[in-house]
């Protein structure tokens, strides 16, 4: 069976469970978000603007070109575009911390950007997928309802974020106590869910993973490289550039997977791309963050790399 025609098995109950996990992730992000994070964005407008342009404009555009360059099938192309249009994942903060980057900036950008993506995800997906010479046919065949997708995203992202934000600002001590637990439980639950989804369709995954491996590997590398290049060309120090790199390179592929099953019937190429992205993104991100962190530590010990660490007056922020 052609990957563009295959549909993965996914029960309605599993879809509800995935929505709960994704909502829990957003709830965890909001528990670590305060009004000061939104004010912090105003204090660092250049870094935020660079990150936002890279995510909303450059990443979808480069992804569009990459699908044409690799000549992937329509469903794989649409899956790559969908992932590129998803908001950043909360693990970007953990990776920024491991890389010894600006965690405070990462937290602020993730919080504000996720709110923006409530509207921009369906807009960007409709725009870039609608322009694609092959993926547009799939978009037309499913009669994608932008308002319905917006409502779904509000329920998955908006409401949990609003609830967590309200708790954080009403009971900050409680939020600080439970946030680390919520964050790690939701992340592990999402990883387990993605692995279970792929395992439940293992024969299909094995049959087509070779087609997807190269595409996801290159796509993820391009996303991380784009974040770094945008930051450095925009004049940001390496300390801030690390945060922007992971903000752009780490996408909420779990949300993308949920949308694949909700609006595209579990279309094979899209589901495998989103599922494998959710796993490989973390592996590649951890590898880069670990290397960066060790390199920065060595530079600090040798008295070099003054551009790579926090300023002396930078407050410590726990990831």
Image (cartoon, rainbow, N blue to C red):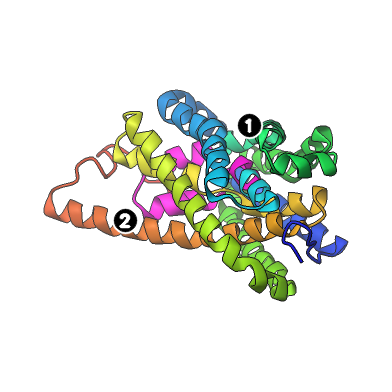
Quadrant where the image shows the N terminus: bottom right
Residue 184 visible in the snapshot: no
Q: Residue at x 40, y 61 (%)?
A: 287
User: Where does the image place residue 71, in percent across and percent down from the top left?
Assistant: 58, 49
Q: Which mark is residue 293?
A: 2
- 40 or 203: nearer the eye? 203
> Toward which corner of the image does residue 207 lie, by quadrant?
bottom right
- Judged from the image, the secondary structure of the residue bearing numbered disc 2 is helix
Quadrant of the rendered image containing residue 186: bottom right
101 magenta-colored: yes
Front residue of this view, candidates 219 and 311: 219
Residue 81 in sight from this viewpoint: yes
Q: Which mark is residue 252?
A: none
Left or right: where 220 falls relative to 121: left
Q: Is residue 179 left or right of residue 265?
A: left
Question: x%, y% of residue 168?
Answer: 62, 42
Is residue 168 shown left or right of residue 98?
A: right
Whole-percent x, y for residue 198 in the image: 68, 69
| Residue 267 position (above or below residue 82) | below
Name the residue rendered at 82%, 33% in the picture.
147
- Pointer 1 residue: 116
The alpha-carbon separation of the residues under discs 2 and 1 comes to 30 Å
Per the rendered image, the range of residues in magenta is: 82-109
Q: Looking at the image, which is closer to me, 145 or 106?
A: 145
């Amino acid at each position: 069976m052609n990957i563009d025609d295959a549909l993965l098995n996914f029960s309605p109950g599993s879809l509800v469970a995935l929505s709960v996990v994704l909502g829990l992730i957003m709830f965890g992000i909001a528990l670590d978000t305060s009004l000061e994070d939104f004010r912090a964005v105003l204090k660092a407008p250049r870094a935020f603007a660079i990150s936002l342009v890279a995510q909303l404009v450059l990443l979808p555009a480069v992804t569009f070109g990459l699908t044409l360059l690799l000549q992937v099938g329509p469903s794989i192309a649409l899956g790559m575009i969908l992932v590129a249009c998803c908001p950043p994942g909360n693990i970007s903060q953990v990776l920024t911390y491991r890389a010894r980057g600006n965690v405070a900036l990462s937290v602020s950008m993730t919080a504000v950007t996720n709110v923006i993506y409530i509207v921009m995800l369906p807009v960007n997906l409709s725009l870039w997928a609608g322009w694609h010479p092959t993926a547009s046919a799939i978009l037309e065949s499913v009669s994608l309802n932008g308002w319905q997708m917006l409502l779904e995203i509000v329920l998955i992202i908006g409401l949990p974020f609003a609830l967590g934000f309200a708790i954080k600002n009403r009971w900050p001590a409680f939020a600080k106590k439970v946030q680390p637990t919520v964050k790690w439980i939701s992340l592990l639950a999402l990883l387990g869910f993605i692995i279970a989804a792929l395992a439940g369709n293992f024969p299909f995954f094995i049959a087509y993973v070779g087609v997807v491996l190269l595409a996801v590997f290159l796509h993820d590398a391009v996303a991380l490289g784009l974040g770094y290049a945008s930051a450095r060309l925009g004049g940001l120090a390496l300390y801030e550039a690390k945060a922007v790199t992971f903000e752009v390179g780490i996408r909420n592929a779990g949300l993308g997977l949920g949308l694949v099953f909700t609006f595209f019937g579990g279309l094979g190429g899209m589901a495998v791309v989103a599922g494998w992205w959710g796993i490989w993104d973390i592996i590649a991100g951890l590898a880069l963050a670990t290397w960066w962190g060790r390199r920065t530590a060595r530079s600090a010990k040798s008295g070099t790399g003054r551009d790579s660490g926090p300023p002396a007056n930078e407050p410590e922020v726990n990831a």
